[in-house]
Amino acid sequence: MKTSNYIQVFEHQVLRVDQQQLTVQQFDALAYFNEQHDQKYFSLLHKGVRFRQYVGVLQVGELTIEILPKTDQHSHRPQNWQKVLLDLLHACEFLKVDALTKAPLQLKTSPLLWLYIELFVQEIEQLLSQGLQKNYRKQSQNAHHWKGQVNFAKQLQKNLTQPHQIYISHQTYDYQHPIHQVLYKALNIIAQFWIDHNLKKKIQYLIKAFPKQQEIVVTETLYNQLYAAPKFRKYHAALDLARMITLQYSPDIRLGNCPVLAILFDMNQLFEQYIQQQLKKTLDNSWQVKAQASKRFWANRNLRPDIWLSHEGNNYILDTKWKILKRPSPSDEDLRQMYAYNHNFKASKSLLIYPNVFDLSQRSAAYAQPILVQGKAVEHYCKVIFVNVLNKKGTLNTYIAQDIIQHLDLD
């Protein structure tokens, strides 16, 4: 779907300049953004871009590009993908917010970026209504009055010819803090983009209401430090949203009014994480569920299946694959991978889990060579299954764990 300022595409789809889907300026902005992020989200073609396995939204100047999962491309049922994606992110704890129902009605049918920004705005409004947390910090400056301690080194360096000033260091209690600085930075970033008029007015009001903050350089390391601040736990939901905004923003420094903002998520990771979370919620205490369990197999290299299950002395390996199969025949590479997992984790059964698109039948077969479990040769299997991420109503399938467990054929 395409309008003048809105394009809806699927994973791995191509957008081209020569087909009037992108302007040259928008293509250059995406190319610059791509260079900044190590070609992570899409690959460049001649006068075009091919998207990878990331879903979400790209804002390029006034153009919104919404990227949907490739399973929707083959679905004949209308799905409210925006809500599904937000529910999926919440279920996987990628976003620790549960405020979608509070979004104004006109936003619920708008581009995903507007919904994401609305969630961030709600978090900032809540923090301001509760009162921002003040903090002590050390401040050094030239002043006309003595307060705190004199910094003699700086006094000699800066004030030899200005005897009426004194360079001091003192404690101050105010709102200047790295957490407030990243939230303020995120507010100023989203204010640049073309969004709903009422939402933009809210953002402009919040920028005025928020205590003015110093500029800050944001990194992953900085955010990890901010989450550890003990007095700022109520800020975590807002930080989750600000993190994506500030780290995935490409400012307009050379391209002429065409900044880029990416709110994108890896569908491979979301698919794996959702299944893992549902298994943990569904299975009782007789089960052990471990994600990315690791065993060394050569030198310093490890094998890490997506999910390892243990129940009554039996081991099972589950590996999720966000791929569309047109027939129930996985690649040799995937089958060899499961063979190695079975051997190293002493698992007699393993599941290759794919999204269900074409209503394919499940397929199970034994490997030719057995594995050794406690000195005994044991036949081991790999089963290929296809699961529905969404139910018939078009919402998340909350019974996906039961659907998977039944394929282990427990006695």
Image: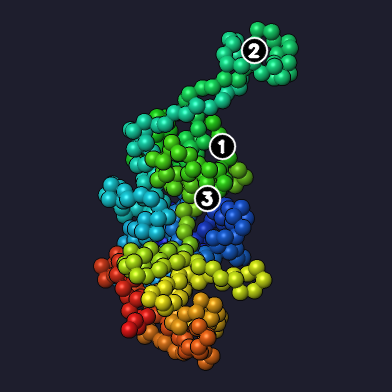
Q: On screen, 377 above or below 202?
A: below
Place residue 149 in its image quadrant.
top right
158 left or right of 133?
right
Give the mark nearer the N terminus: 1 vs 3: 1
Examine the rendering and report whether any part of residue 114 can be seen: no
User: Which residue is under mark 2?
Assistant: 166
Rendered location of residue 195, percent (x, y): 40, 46
> Gap in Å between the C-alphas at discs 1 and 3?
15 Å
Q: Closer to the observer: label 1 or label 2?
A: 2
Q: Nearer the viewer, residue 181 or 393?
A: 181
Residue found at x 49% / y 53%: 262
User: Which residue is under mark 3?
Assistant: 248
User: Which residue is under mark 1?
Assistant: 216
Instruction: For mark 3, give the secondary structure.
Output: loop
Give the amino acid at mark 3.
Gln
Marks 2 and 3 in Cβ contact (< 8 Å): no
Residue found at x 45% / y 56%: 57
Q: On screen, 274 above or below 117?
A: below
316 left or right of 159?
left
Mark number displayed over residue 300 = none
Quadrant in the picture for the N terminus: bottom left
> Gap in Å between the C-alphas at discs 2 and 3?
42 Å
Q: Nearer the viewer, residue 283 or 22?
A: 283
Give the mark nearer the N terminus: 2 vs 3: 2
View extreme (bottom): residue: 368
Rendered location of residue 226, percent (x, y): 50, 41
Residue found at x 64% / y 12%: 166
Give the mark nearer the N terminus: 1 vs 2: 2
Rendered location of residue 361, percent (x, y): 37, 85
Rendered location of residue 147, percent (x, y): 57, 13
